[in-house]
Amino acid sequence: MKFKKLFFLLGMVVLIASFANAQNQYIGAAKCKMCHNKADKGEQYNKWAASPHAKALASLKGAEAKDPKCLKCHSTAASVDQSLVASITVEEGVSCESCHGPGSNYKVATTMKDQKLAMSKGMIMPEEKVCLKCHNKESPNFKGFNFKEYSAKISHKDPSKKS
């Protein structure tokens, strides 16, 4: 009987600890790649890896690469609360989670199959305001921003899902 009580208590501790650690963390593009690099799903990871977003950090020269004013838009990992960084790296540049939110709570395949559930766990379907955090007049290279035009350039829909 004591054995059952011990297992019950351990189970409760694990459950409580999982709720306490439920804050969504940034996991990085490599974790997204596991599911989002399949041809039948649209190879979203490859599209991102070939994009200017993935190369955003590399576009900074000299002191810019360490300047927080630059890093806030050129690196997801450098722009977020560091207590929320799990496995994302600064070198990723502007990763999936800049647009879709930190993924630790929605990364599981069963969650991702249900968009409503994924969104309830922190996934974001980016709107113009998400892009405007960086694509704005504060940027020294700003030349205007047309959300419809630019979002079409980085579109990475899953062809297996109905639109």
Image (cartoon, helix red, strand yellow):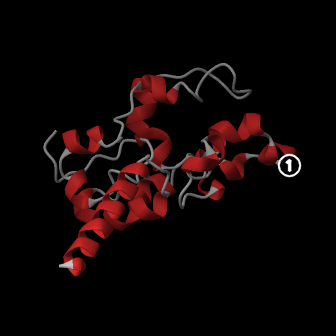
Would residue 74 be found to the left or right of residue 9 on screen? right
Task: State the residue at coordinates (22%, 62%).
Answer: 40
- Residue in front for this viewpoint, 33 or 46: 33
Q: Which residue is mark 1?
A: 62
Q: Is residue 113 above or below residue 80?
A: below
Residue 32 occupies quadrant = bottom left
Q: Secondary structure at mark 1?
A: helix
- Position of residue 47 measured from the top left corner of the image (x, y, whole percent): 42, 54
Q: Is residue 94 above or below residue 124?
A: below
Q: Residues within 10 Å of mark 1 (few under 14, many from 20)?
A: few
Task: State the residue at coordinates (61%, 42%).
Answer: 81
- Position of residue 91 measured from the top left corner of the image (x, y, whole percent): 65, 57
Quadrant location of the C terminus in the rendered image:
top left
Q: Amino acid at mark 1?
A: Gly
Q: Which residue is outermost to the left?
A: 162
- Residue in front for this viewpoint, 105 or 31: 105
Would residue 58 be found to the left or right of residue 9 on screen? right
Task: State the residue at coordinates (78%, 48%).
Answer: 65
How many marks on residues? 1
Q: Which residue is outermost to the right?
A: 63
- Residue in front for this viewpoint, 78 or 128: 78
Task: State the residue at coordinates (17%, 79%).
Answer: 1
Q: Is residue 3 above or below residue 128?
A: below
- Residue in front for this viewpoint, 108 or 92: 108
From where the camera sits, is residue 38 visible? no
- Position of residue 134 measured from the top left corner of the image (x, y, whole percent): 60, 30
- Position of residue 69 measured from the top left corner of the image (x, y, whole percent): 75, 34
From where the camera sits, is residue 149 visible? yes
